[in-house]
Amino acid sequence: MARIYITTSFKGTENKEETESLCSLIKEAGFEDFCFIRDIENYQKIFNNPKDLMEKAFEEIKKSDFLLIDMSDKPTGRAIEAGIAYAIGKKIIVTMKQGTKIKDTTRGIADVIIEYNSLEDIIPKLQTYLLAR
């Protein structure tokens, strides 16, 4: 079963419902879902040293088959995770709301770009892409 590292912004519990929804969709689609903020940090700041945080993120990205990043808003830390995944040869899945403009650098690392109106829209496209591999 393919493991998908799902990047999300750290906002404490503010975006927990959205994160849980996305993770559930990935799992329902038949893939192993992993989300650093949920699975390692439990929606709390637990790393006092940023280097430790990034070393643990790197370790988890290495264990994953794919990295999924949503580009609908401006990513910061998530873009670093995508860069790590790209540098070590992991496949990058970019999702974004219809009409979002993304930079050529994002297009350059993406193996697939999935546009959606609601999060549920990504599942058939994700299944088609991943099952064709």
Image (cartoon, rainbow, N blue to C red):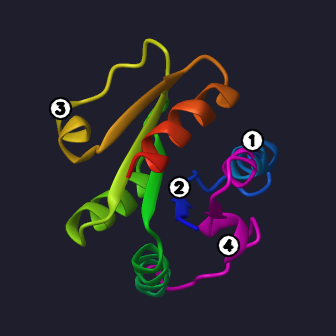
Disc nearer the start of the sequence (1/2): 2
Question: Residue 104 has which mark?
Answer: 3
Q: Are marks 4 and 3 in contact (CB under 8 Å)?
A: no
Q: Earlier in the sequence, mark 4 or mark 3?
A: 4
Q: Which residues are magenta?
A: 25-50
Mark 1 and mark 4 lie on one chain; the one further toward the N terminus is: 1
- Tell me the SS state at disc 1: helix
Q: Amino acid type of disc 4?
A: Lys
Which mark is first along the chain, 1 or 3? Answer: 1
Q: Residues within 10 Å of mark 2 (few under 14, many from 20)?
A: many
Give the label on residue 7, or none.
2
- First in residue order: circle 4 vs circle 2: 2
Q: Label 4 to label 3, Cα distance in Å?
A: 32 Å
Three-letter residue code for mark 2 = Thr
Which residue appears at 76% of the width and 71% of the height?
42
Query: Which one is in front in this view, the residue at disc 4 or the one at disc 3?
Result: 3
Q: What amino acid is at disc 3?
A: Asp
